[in-house]
Amino acid sequence: MKKKYQKAGLFLIRFSLLTVLGYGALLPAPFMATAQEAKLTVRGSGLPVPRFVSLKFNEANLRAGPGSEYPVLWQYRQAGLPLLVDAEFGVWRKVRDADGTTGWMHGAGLSLRRMAFIHEGMAKIYQRDNSDSGVVAVAEKNALLELESCPKNWCRVTTDTVKGWVKRTAIWGVLKDESLK
């Protein structure tokens, strides 16, 4: 007698799951979470994803997964390097660098300080946010600059010795439609 109830219970569970899954297919798109939304943040910081951060320390490990038990894929040795956070899992952040290398880093090694990276050739830094103003400096490829603001097509940047404006297209470290003030 007990076996009948167990089989019947199993049947009901299967039927219930199929019913729920079937109704889920009938729900309009706004009520269903997509796989991409589900992977973006799992018990994370609550900050928007994607977003840019920078390395807090001169040495930081990029791992294959969200935990110290995962192997180290790469070691960064430059504080201030901008990284794009693609996903979060607890205290771990899935990040991507300017070259497209992806992996996981502990959130404690990342800073909200906004930095930019000259990704192609050299970039002129101007006095104001237009090409007609005087050139203050020329930043070489891979130069790190602190981002102060990025309202539209130009970004205000600073280093220890230089302040000025650079074309948004010359840097990596700001989202396409992001307005940084």
Image: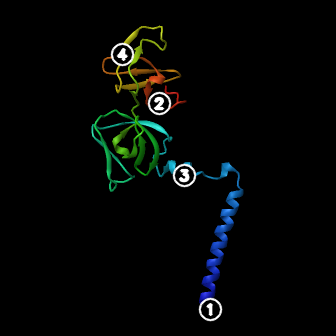
Q: Amino acid at mark 3?
A: Ala
Label 3 secondary element: helix
Look at discs 3 and 4 and give the one toward the viewer. 4
Q: Amino acid at mark 1?
A: Met
The circle drawn on residue 1 is 1
Q: Which residue is mark 2?
A: 174
Query: Of the residues under marks 2 and 4, which one precedes in the sequence?
Result: 4
Query: Of the residues under marks 3 and 1, which one precedes in the sequence?
Result: 1
Q: Amino acid at mark 2?
A: Val
Q: CA distance from mark 2 to mark 4?
A: 20 Å
Residue placed most toward the observer, 47 or 79: 79
Q: CA distance from mark 1 to mark 2?
A: 66 Å
Residue at figure coordinates x 48%, y 42% from the top left: 47
Residue at figure coordinates x 63%, y 87% from the top left: 4
Q: CA distance from mark 2 to mark 3?
A: 24 Å
Residue at figure coordinates x 48%, y 14% from the top left: 129
Query: Of the residues under marks 1 and 4, which one precedes in the sequence?
Result: 1
* Neighbour tally class for label 1: few under 14, some 14-19, many 20 plus, Cα within 10 Å: few
Q: CA distance from mark 1 to mark 4?
A: 84 Å
Contact between marks 1 and 4 (CB within 8 A): the answer is no
The circle drawn on residue 38 is 3
67 over 17 or under it: above or below? above
Q: Residue lying farthest bottom?
A: 1
Label 1 secondary element: loop
Q: Quadrant of residue 7?
A: bottom right
Q: Which residue is mark 4?
A: 138
Protein image colouring = rainbow
